Image (cartoon, rainbow, N blue to C red):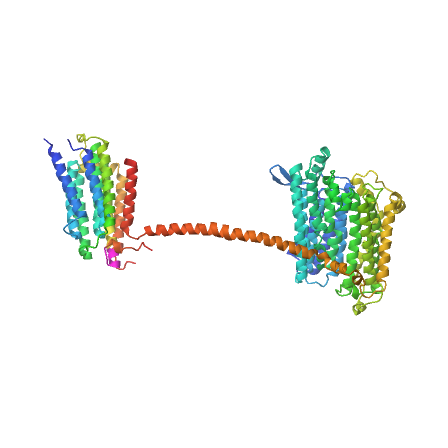
Amino acid sequence: MHVGLEHYLVVSALLFSLGLLGVLARRNVLVMYMSLELMLNAANLALVAFSRFNNNLNGQVMVFFIITVAAAEVSVGLALIVALYRKRQTAHVEDLTAMKL
Amino acid sequence: MPHLPDIFFYVFAALTLLCGFLVVVNPFSRSPVTSAMFLVLTIISMAGLFVLLHAFFLAAVQILVYAGAVIVLFLFVIMLLDLKEEQRRKLKTFSLAAGVISVGAIAGLTVKAILDSGPGKGLPAPTVEGATAPLGKLLFTQFLLPFEIVSVLLLVAMVGVILLSKKDLK
Amino acid sequence: MSLLPWLILFLPLAGAVGITLFTQRDRDLSAKISIAAVWLSFFFSGLLCLFTSGTFKDAGLSAEWLTVGDLVVDFGFIIDPLSSLMLFIVTGVGGLIHIYSYGYMHEDRAVSRFFASLSLFTFAMLGVVLANNLLMMFIFWELVGVSSYLLIGFWYEKESAADAAKKAFITNRLGDFGFILGIILVWATLGGLNFSVLKETLAKNPGAMGGLATAAGLLLFCGAMGKSAQFPLHVWLPDAMEGPTPVSALIHAATMVAAGVYMLCRVFFLLDVPGSHAQLGYMVMAVGLAAPGAAMFHLATHAFFKALLFLGAGSVIHALHHEQDIWKMGGLKSKLPTTYRTFLIGTLALCGVPPLSGFYSKDGILAAASPSGSHPNPFLFILVVGVAALTAFYMARLFLVAFLGKAKDHCVDHAHESPGVMIWPLRILGTLSVIAGFMGLEQMLGRFFGDEHAHSLGYIAQLFAPFGHAPLAAFFGLFATVLGFSVAYALYANASTDPLPAKLGFLARAMRDRFYFDEIYTGLIRLTHEAISYVASWIDRWLVAGLVVRGTHGTTELFGRALRLVQTGNLQTYAFLLVLGVALLLFIILK
């Protein structure tokens, strides 16, 4: 059986789920962030596969933009984490419960 | 006798998933540094998958931006914060189980849907190459406006990061 | 020409507004503005009468005022002998009272407010008189209530005056409630409110009101009852004496009480339906006896001599520095000669002594009820004769005690005649009281109400007319008067205290307490009030506060408490819930 679109999509879905699990299960904010990156990459993989499947480059352009946005997002997010750590001396998500009344 | 690219696909896919799994769940270490290193491996093997999909430019960008910049940034922050190993707190079994079940449900549902949608026929023969030149042409013609907007976004992010990193953040 | 009614109506209002807004400080000017306004109205009424010469004119004088669905309400005037006569009474007698008040109220601090209220009252009364439809009449009717409230409660610092004003207003409201129900009923059955339209409708189809005629009549009558202070809504009238005496004159004699009778005469054609007479007859006799001409005639003469009597009494009170107890007076004949003479005329007129006006007008009503009259009714006839005797008795008593005999208190010693502004209205009203009986008013009104027997007589013939066409009535009227006078003379000729209470015993006490009407009403109101408030409190406590308010807040709080458990503040809980939602959504879509 030739490797087709669905193979890539399955890999993408599994990778996405792994990232989701990381966000849900890990307590370190940094590791949660890395899991988020995994999820973004899973989406990228799906998009590139679609692009190849349709034989045009629009999907790849989309991925290019996603990578750019992700880079911006990572820098801002990490800056936030650093600022948060300075204030609260912790990177554990369970200690960050300011949203609770 | 399977194709050579197909064999590569399985290899890279297995590597990606394995490394991704180790980023999230590492039975041996809870250090964020380990997670970061496995993330690098995940990204590199994914770049391999990109190459298999004829997205050469993106494969290069993936490695340059993610492995070269993003992960380095992560490591810097880890060192800056001097994070100790994630303490092995008592896991909330209920919430963990709930998380695994719901994530598994999503994964299962998606995969089943994908596989149900149609038998694999393989990919059509490539007519466009995801090389630098065609992609660049597309970016500077059809997607010029989003491209410029993204550049502004980067600028904003830069300014925001500098502001956030100031010591006397009010 | 068509401007005249507008001028007549709105001059007093302009006066009231002008006084209130601009001349509050200048008491003298305020009084003069008010007096000028009412006399200008009088003058224009004269002009109007001259131009229309008593012919019925309604068209061209109205403007469409509001339209609700198929109901069109005009703001228009009705000019006929009836309203012309009332115009003269309201502006004429009212004007005299204005002038009189100028003297009477001279020393009061709030003269401006008084005259503003007087002008407003005049405006309201003129509105009632000129209104060409029931709704407009009702609005001005209410305005009369408001302005009478202002006037009766003029000395509002006095608690009794404030209470009396409230009492008058509330009692009137009771009647007005019936009035507006009646108006609605008339509108619902006849589909219009204009008097002329209503008249036409009824002329075409006398049975248009059907069985509701009696109900509508009674309800309209209810309104008249409040304003005219008829039993059982009479309780406000005695208390209304708390206002300044000119106000009493205005309310009693000239206008307000007359408004009720006028209204009944105006809507007489509505009531002129077989079956409704019997009920109404016992209440406002003359109208009930289908003799509105006689009723209006009596109203006019009554306005003259009743106003005369009140103003005379006011003059006495003024002279004695607000002493109101007649048992402290006596011998005023020599001290206040003019007041004495005019008061005598008023008394005789009220008691129905010929040839003064009261005799003729009262005779008209008596004649209608007498066995040979248009609506023979022996019971009513005897009742009227009895009332006439009582009237003669109490007036003679008042007169004998206050004016004749010896002075019973030293306050009389310093009494001196009132100034000219107060005396001249008395003289004019006295003259009118004498001559009003044979001026021909009766015939004019009779023609208006379609009495074909009415015809003009010479003045001399007029003098003796009552003896001619209804000798029985005339005789009994005179008999009653003489009877009243003699009894009063026998009891009070030289009395220094009132001998009657001792003789009547319980009856006297009951009379002094006004037959306990106030007490009965207070008790009734308290009972209903408590019953209603008990129900209201139950509803409020258990349904509103219990079920609605507490139920709502309880449910909300319960849900709030439940939902608060979800808000852990833990980021991952939220993420988990989000994922759960996504999983559910995917399950539904992909399945």
Q: Position of residue C44 (x, y in %)?
A: 75, 47
Q: Which residues are magenta?
A: A82-91
Magenta-colored stretch includes residue A84: yes
From the viewer's perspective, is residue C379 above or below residue C423?
Answer: above
Farthest residue, direction left: B1
For the N terminus of chain A, the quadrant is top left
- Residue that appears at 30% across and 43% down: C581
Location of residue C424 (image quadrant): bottom right
The residue closer to the viewer here, C23 or A94, is A94
Residue found at x 22% / y 30% = B118
Residue C504 seen anywhere in this rendered image of the structure: yes
Image quarter (top left, top right, bottom left or bottom right) of the C terminus of chain A: bottom left
Percent across and percent down for residue C406 are 84, 67
Q: Extreme front residue here?
A: C506
Principal SS element in the magenta part?
helix
For residue C149, say whether it is visible. no
Rendered location of residue C57, percent (x, y)? 74, 39
Pick the residue in front: A62 or C239.
C239
Left or right relative to A56: residue C377: right
Q: Is residue C146 above or below residue B150?
A: below
For the residue pair B87 and C559, the one nearer the viewer reads as C559
Image quadrant where residue B84 sits: bottom left
Task: Reply yes or no: does residue C45 show up in magenta.
Answer: no
Residue C355 percent across, percent down from the top left: 87, 50
Marks counted in the figure total 0
C403 in relation to B65, above or below: below
